[in-house]
Image (cartoon, grey):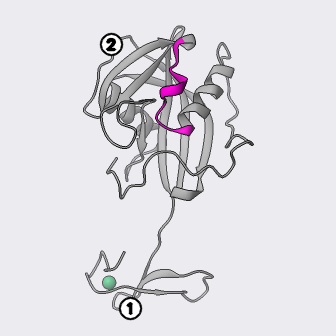
Amino acid sequence: MRFCPRCGGPLERRIPEFDDRERHVCPACEIVHYSNPKVVVGSVCTLGDRLLLCRRAIAPSRGLWTIPAGYLENGETVEEGARREAWEEARAEIELQGLIAVYSIKRIDQVQLLYKARLVHAEVGAGPESLEVRLVDWHDIPWEELAFPTVHWVLRRAAELRGDPGPYVPVGNPPAAPTLGAGFPPSSAEGN
Ligand code: ZN
């Protein structure tokens, strides 16, 4: 960030009073423009013994499989965001069953809140960001063709929870890869 989003004037990098790290500060507005991690919301959506996967129509990882997920919007609860993403990417109506994972992706400053959800019905279809959507059996998950490490992680987590009616305890990053810097793309690369 180089210019103030409020007044358009040039920003300075400095440590504000009572703070301990450098921030973008507008000397004209006397406003600190904080930069904080972005929140991604998404769901592992199931119907009976199948789950919903989407093949990405957009970069990065175009052509690879993912779950419906994306950036939380302003003015939206995390639950609303998860339901919106399911609709946008897979034309899926879902009922959230519980939060099953919270992943911290430090390298790209991202937090992912991922739910287990039930599809309300089997009618699904590719939204503009998906090449195709499929309801696949758990045994048919294309593990070698998943778009992001966090998709692996959450599908493994969801597989553990098969048949478990909940309530669920959300897990964090797998211990084997606590600092793995991958996930959804940073917002500079892609809007949503
Ligand atoms: Zn300003």
Cβ of mark 2 under 8 A from ligand 1: no
139 and 165: which is toward the camera = 139
**Could you classify mark 2 by the number of other residues whose Cα lies within 10 Å: few (under 14), some (14-19), or many (20 or more)?**
few
Answer with mark 1 or mark 2, whichever residue precedes in sequence: 1
Q: Is residue 101 left or right of residue 119?
A: right
Horizontal side of 94 relative to 128 (left or right) equals right
Q: Is residue 42 above or below residue 133?
A: below
Q: Choose top left, top right, bottom left or bottom right for residue 113.
A: top right
Quadrant for ligand 1 reads bottom left
In-front residue for pair 141/129: 141
Which residue is at a point 54% across and 45% down the rendered structure image? Answer: 112
Residue visible at 41% across and 32% down in the picture: 83
Q: Quadrant of residue 162?
A: top right
Disc sitting over residue 123 in the figure: 2
Return the residue nearer the eye: 188 or 69.
188
Q: CA distance from mark 1 to mark 2?
A: 54 Å
In the image, what residue type sits under mark 2? Glu
> In this view, which residue lies farthest toward the front?
144
Q: Position of residue 168 (x, y in %)?
A: 68, 29
Mark 1 and mark 2 in contact? Answer it, CB < 8 Å.
Answer: no
The residue identified by callout 1 is 27
Decide whether residue 142 is among the magenta residues.
Answer: yes
**Residue at 25% in and 81% down:** 8
Which structural element holds mark 1? Answer: loop
**Which three-letter amino acid code belongs to the residue tagged 1?**
Pro
Which stretch did the figure color magenta? Answer: 140-149
Quadrant containing the N terminus in the rendered view? bottom left
Q: Is residue 67 magenta?
A: no
User: Which type of secondary structure does the marked residue at label 2 adopt?
Assistant: loop
